[in-house]
Image: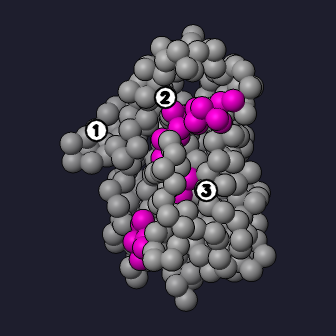
Amino acid sequence: MEIQAMKYANEIASAGHVAMLQACGPGMMEYELESTFLHRCYGGGGCRHAPYTPICASGPNGAVLHYGHAGAPNNRQLQDGDMMLCDMGCEYYGYDSDITTSFPVSGKFSDDQKVVYGAVLSAFKSVIAQLKPGVSWPDMHRLANRRILEGLKAGGFLQGDVDEMMAKHLGALFMPHGLGHMLGLDTHDVGGYAPGCPERIMEPGIKSLRTARVLEAGMVLTVEPGCYFNAFLLEPALVDPSLEGFFVKSAIERCMQTGGVRLEDNIVITADGCYSLTDVPREIEDVEGVMAGAPWPRHQNDKKRKAGQ
């Protein structure tokens, strides 16, 4: 019954995200997109409350992990060429959804945006394909880091050996948060570091994980890899002698004000795998299609859609 409540919250929040893709355009304010989502969830789904302050980040604001708070209340104007990062959910009978979509304001991905989005999508799909009981969550975080680094290298942002990048914790410069968290009656739900569970691993990036547990059937978690161009982290790294040779500086500097990409689904762990409660476009052609007016189906009722496909 709890999963059914979260499934409904995901159906409605997914429809809210699709509504933002359909409404988005240069000249809008971030809060206009936020209100599009909230109206769809309440007016079209009866979900009155958001379980956390919506993050509706355009351009460089996408590199601020919890942008949208009272000090920066989603009040930037969207510019042609910006990426949007929209992290928003809704609440139904106290149970939460927590979904993130990333998409180009113009409706078409630039070459650089395709590289970054593709790297995050690769991480997203690779992790979900591995999820089942017995899998270590820290191992999934490391897998996401590896896929993002591989994508950035293939796209001309990084150079050198990916194993060496992993040993230097280079992934934490681009994804300075954990892969995901428990989800339920709270957005960051309890149980991550409960008594008797694995303790926090104090490594760069991984120390931000909200749990280090081994997955069990019945768990509901978010999977939300991201890649960000955050000057606070990257500018010192570019001149760090221990990291010399990994960065293609011209490419990194070109994207320093572009923000970031995050993709987030809500995943149920089953006895032999997992499935997603979330139903939003993920492939580049699907995102561009919906932004151009193509329809997108709501979550397919009781059919368990294999996550990440």
Badge nearest the viewer, 3 or 2: 3
Q: Tell whether 264 sits left or right of 43.
A: right
Which one is nearer the viewer's eye here, 250 or 259? 250
Amino acid type at image mark 1: Asn
Image quarter (top left, top right, bottom left or bottom right) of the N terminus: bottom right
Residue 115 position by quadrant? top right
Residue ID for mark 3: 138
Task: Give the number of the mark in front: 1 or 3.
Answer: 3
Q: Which of the two marks, 2 or 1, is nearer to us in this view?
A: 2
Disc 1 and disc 3: Cα gap in Å? 35 Å
- In reply to whether residue 116 is colored magenta, the answer given is no
- Say if 101 sits above or below 150 in the image: below
Residue assigned mark 2? 229
Residue most toward the left? 71
Q: Is residue 184 magenta?
A: yes
Examine the rendering and report whether any part of residue 278 can be seen. no
Q: Is residue 227 above or below residue 17?
A: above
Residue placed most toward the observer, 89 or 260? 260
Query: How many neighbours does mark 2 have within 10 angstroms: few (below 14), some (14-19), or many (20 or more)?
Result: many
